[in-house]
Amino acid sequence: MSTMLAAIAVALIPPVAIAMLLRLADRTQRKRDERIARQIELTDAIHRELGAIVAPTVEKGRRGGLAVRMTVPFDRPELVATLLTVTDQVFSRHDDTHVVEIAFTPRPGSVATRERAGSTQKRAMERPVPMIAAAR
């Protein structure tokens, strides 16, 4: 009797493991689809409000929530404030308990980026490129 129960248990291990892995894959895909849907919703809301000025990305956050990243011109604070408002409106529509991290990075070529770089630092195109020679 115990041999038969052991055989049944051993026979059930592969289907149960496969079912668990399929559920995990389904859950992962659902979360990915939700992130993509939020990114599309946020992009559409920003484009409706301000035009096509930024392209936000929505990724998995460090603390299990979501992370929104945008490259913005820091020399226009009213634009940054509007982006924060629109982002807050989009993510407050959903009943998530997740934390949303918002990260702005300066747009290359903006006044804030040039001031931070300083006048003594050369642009990337003006820097000398080191030559590497391989001895044979």
Image (tube, rainbow, N blue to C red):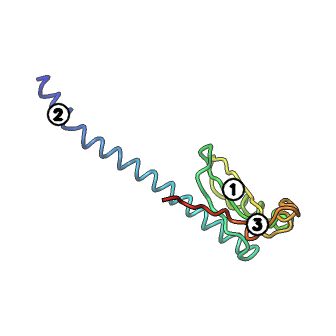
Q: Which mark is residue 12?
A: none
Which mark is in front, 3 or 2? 3
Where residue 6 appears, as percent x and y from the top left, is 17, 28
Return the residue at label 2.
8
Tell me the distance, in whole angstroms, between the alpha carbons under discs 3 and 2. Answer: 62 Å
Q: Judge from the rendering whether residue 8 lies leftward or rightward of residue 66; answer left or right.
A: left
Return the residue at label 3.
107
Where residue 44 appears, as percent x and y from the top left, is 65, 71
Which mark is in front, 2 or 1? 2
Kind of residue indicated by mark 1: Ser
| Element assignment for label 3 | loop
> Which circle's residue, 2 or 1, is located before the other in the chain?
2
Kind of residue indicated by mark 2: Ile
Give 54 or 130, whichever is nearer the viewer: 130
Which mark is in front, 1 or 3? 3
Graded by Cα atoms within 10 Å as few (under 14), some (14 to 19) or many (20 or more), the crowding at tag 2 reads few
Tell me the distance, in whole angstroms, between the alpha carbons under discs 1 and 3. Answer: 26 Å
Q: Quadrant of the N terminus?
A: top left
| Element assignment for label 2 | helix
CB contact under 8 Å: marks 3 and 2 = no
Where residue 29 appears, as percent x and y from the top left, is 45, 56
Residue visible at 52% across and 58% down in the picture: 135
Where residue 131 appears, as percent x and y from the top left, is 63, 63
Tell me the distance, in whole angstroms, between the alpha carbons under discs 2 and 1. Answer: 50 Å
Can you name the residue that lies furthest to the front here? 136
Give 124 or 69, whichever is nearer the viewer: 124
Q: Judge from the rendering whether residue 49 lies leftward or rightward of residue 60; answer left or right.
A: right
| Element assignment for label 1 | helix
Return the residue at label 1.
92
Kind of residue indicated by mark 3: Arg
> Which circle's residue, 3 or 2, is located before the other in the chain?
2
Residue visible at 73% across and 73% down in the picture: 53
